[in-house]
Each structure stands twice: as C-alpha cells, then as structure tokens.
Image: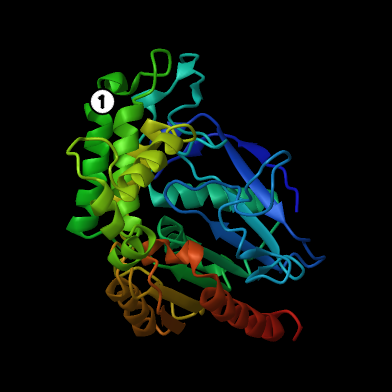
C-alpha cells in the first residue's frame, strides 16, 4: 500500500492557555475508503515520537509506517471496512506546526517562542481536521501511550463525537516517576551546548543531548525480560576482557544506534514541548464523562510487562469509566515486550481489537 501525506492549513488557533497561533498546518494520512454515510471512520493517534505515517509505504521507502502490522487489509484496523485517519500532532516536527516551523511574525523558526501546548490543544487540531473532512462522528478512536492520552482527551472534550474508544498502554495522568523520566530527557537536551536556548536551527542541532534523551526513553519502552532475550551478555563477557568505554555490549551499541538515528528525524524543541504536554495531562477530574446521556464503548488494553505505564494505571481508567456508567472491556495482555508491546504484540492485540470493532460494526453500521 503506497500512501501520501496530505496537509491542511487552519486559520488562527486559540490554545488552552489562551495564547494564539496565527495559523496551523496539520499533516495527515488516510487509508481505506470513506463510505457514503461517513460513519466508518477510525482516528489513530500516535505516541510521543510518532507521526502521521502509521501504515503503508511512502514512495521509495524501505520500511512501512509505525503501525503497519495493525492497519491495513484484514488487519486489526481493517482498511477494507474502515476509513482510517492519522495526523501528526500539534507541536510535532513531521509536517504539523511546531517549534521548528517558521514564525510568520519573525520569518524565523519559533524555537522557544512557540507557545506552550497541551494534549487538549492537539485534540482540538484533530477535531478541526475531522470537521474539514465533513465527518460528524468517529466510529472509533485508538492509540497507545501518548496516543492513549489523546483518546481519553477526545472523550473528555468531544464525547458526543465518539462511538467507541481504544486507549492502549496509557494513563489518566503522569506519576512523579513518569515525569522524572521526561525531566531527565529534557535536561539532557538543554545541557547540550548546541541547544543554545532553543535557537539552534542556524548553528547546529543538539544531537548529543537528544540522542541521550532517546536512549533513556528507549530503556523505559522495553522490559528486563525483553532485554535479556535480545541482548544475552554471557558470551559478550567472555570476549570483552579489556576495560574501555567503547560499546562492549550489544545493548550499548543498540542504544547508541537508536539515539543516532532518532536525531535525524526529530526536533529537540518538539521533544521538550511534547514531553511537557504529557506531564501536564490530567483527565482524572470530576467533569470526565459525567454526562449520563453520553454512552461510549471502551476497549482498554494494557500489557503485563509494561513498567512505564503499568497495568494498574489502565485499571484506574477502567474503574473511572465504570463509575461513570460507561461500557468497558478490559484486557491485560501477557507479553514480554514491555511498553513497546502495543507496537509489537500483533497476534493477541489484533484478535482483541478486531473482535471489538467487528462486533460494534455489526451493531452500529450493519444494523442500520
């Protein structure tokens, strides 16, 4: 499946903090066919460092989109049946307006002149995209990690626009530990002398600091078991007898590679802004889905080896939703992949999501 990224430019956007962006360009991709009733739409929301390219291949690409194992013909999000939309978030650096975009007032990159953003602001931009496409209601919205935060923010801000929701490996708000991980990453970026107070676009990127931030983040995405399986160290200890600070172990080389490739595709200021938005995210409030006339069907997924967003946080989501009278299905999937399981655990995740969506499709669309 070959796909192209599309772009929509929106007029002035008023943010949650009342600051304004004079215009916003949003990058998005679509997969499948929109039916005549426009009621077969699923919105996919991406995680922290993701983008709009969740499936298929861009022309000339060797690798597909980041969730290609789940989005496509006969997959969990079946493009034979559903019209799938995925957009790059506000504050990103893959086609949607963010700190690396040109500030029309100065003719230069925003840098730290870019206003603070929230998960709610990201969702507001997605809502404007949905409105532009003439879609009245989403059949479903799904996403993992920060994508799951966006799912919860959607049902918080626009519950009347959502029939079903699939938050995966996520939380209603960050814990101090989760904020701490993000803060170490931010400090790593800002400690790089090349960061230059956020104004590095003409002088050179803070690649070292951003690479270390990515290395730290990637450790939290895996589990101890998955690391032991991927990087057995017994034989490496036997051959590495000379003490030095090279990448003696495969896991060191792997993390360095992850860091060096990440800096080629991601903006350091976007890293700072998006991680802060995640840390301030909080839908654990009394107003969350308190309207008794709102009924949304939820599928909440977590993974037993995920220690970044542990299962207890998904269980808190389930409890909160049930207390508010919502219909919730919850599955805690047995996987050794850690937090990355939502991207890698295809077999079980696909079966559960496909069953949930197909049953709902028969009830809501086929039953019309």
Which residue shows up at 69% across the image and 43% down it? 58
**Which residue is tagged 1?**
192
Quadrant for the N terminus in the image: bottom right
Q: Position of residue 34 (x, y in %)?
A: 77, 61
Does residue 101 lie above or below 48 as drawn?
Answer: above
Q: Position of residue 305 (x, y in %)?
A: 33, 71
Q: Is residue 305 left or right of residue 120?
A: left
Q: Position of residue 230 (x, y in %)?
A: 38, 60
Q: Position of residue 90 (x, y in %)?
A: 48, 41
Tell which of 128 and 327 is nearer to you.
Answer: 327
Q: Which element is circle 1 on?
A: loop
Which residue shows up at 66% across the image and 48% down it? 29
Tell which of 69 and 328 is nearer to you.
Answer: 69
Does residue 331 lie above or below 253 as drawn?
Answer: below
Q: Is residue 1 left or right of residue 186?
A: right
**What's the image's color scheme?**
rainbow
For the question of whether residue 294 can be seen, the reply is no
User: Residue 290, located in which quarter of the rendered image?
Assistant: bottom left
């Amino acid at each position: 499946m070959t796909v192209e990224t599309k772009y929509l430019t929106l007029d002035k956007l008023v943010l949650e903090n009342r600051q304004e962006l004079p215009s916003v360009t949003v990058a998005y991709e679509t997969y499948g066919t929109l039916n005549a009733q426009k009621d077969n739409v699923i919105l996919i929301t991406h995680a922290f460092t993701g983008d709009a390219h969740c499936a298929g291949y861009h022309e000339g690409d060797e690798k597909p989109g980041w969730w290609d194992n789940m989005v496509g013909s006969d997959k969990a999000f079946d493009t034979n049946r559903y019209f799938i939309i995925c957009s790059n978030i506000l504050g990103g650096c893959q086609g949607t307006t963010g700190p690396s975009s040109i500030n029309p007032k100065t003719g230069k990159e925003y840098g730290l002149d870019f206003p603070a953003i929230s998960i709610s602001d990201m969702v507001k931009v997605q809502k404007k995209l949905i409105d532009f496409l003439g879609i009245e209601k989403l059949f479903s919205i799904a996403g993992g990690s920060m994508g799951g935060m966006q799912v919860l923010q959607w049902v918080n801000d626009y519950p009347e626009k959502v029939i079903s929701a699939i938050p995966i490996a996520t939380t209603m708000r960050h814990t101090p530990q989760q904020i701490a991980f993000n803060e170490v990453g931010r400090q790593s970026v800002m400690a790089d002398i090349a960061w230059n107070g956020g104004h590095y676009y003409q002088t050179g990127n803070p690649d070292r600091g951003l690479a270390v931030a990515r290395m730290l983040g990637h450790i939290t995405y895996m589990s101890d078991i998955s690391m032991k399986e991927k990087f057995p160290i017994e034989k490496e200890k036997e051959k590495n007898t000379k003490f030095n600070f090279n990448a003696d172990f495969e896991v060191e080389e792997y993390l360095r590679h992850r860091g060096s490739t990440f800096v080629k595709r991601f903006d350091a200021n976007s890293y700072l802004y998006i991680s802060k938005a995640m840390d301030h995210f909080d839908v654990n409030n009394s107003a969350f889905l308190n309207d008794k006339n709102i009924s949304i069907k939820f599928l909440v997924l977590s993974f037993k080896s995920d220690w970044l967003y542990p299962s207890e946080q998904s269980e808190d989501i389930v409890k909160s939703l049930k207390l508010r009278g919502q219909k919730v299905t919850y599955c805690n999937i047995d996987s050794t992949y850690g937090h990355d399981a939502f991207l890698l655990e295809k077999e079980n995740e696909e079966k559960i999501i496909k069953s949930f969506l197909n049953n709902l499709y028969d009830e809501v669309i086929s039953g019309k």
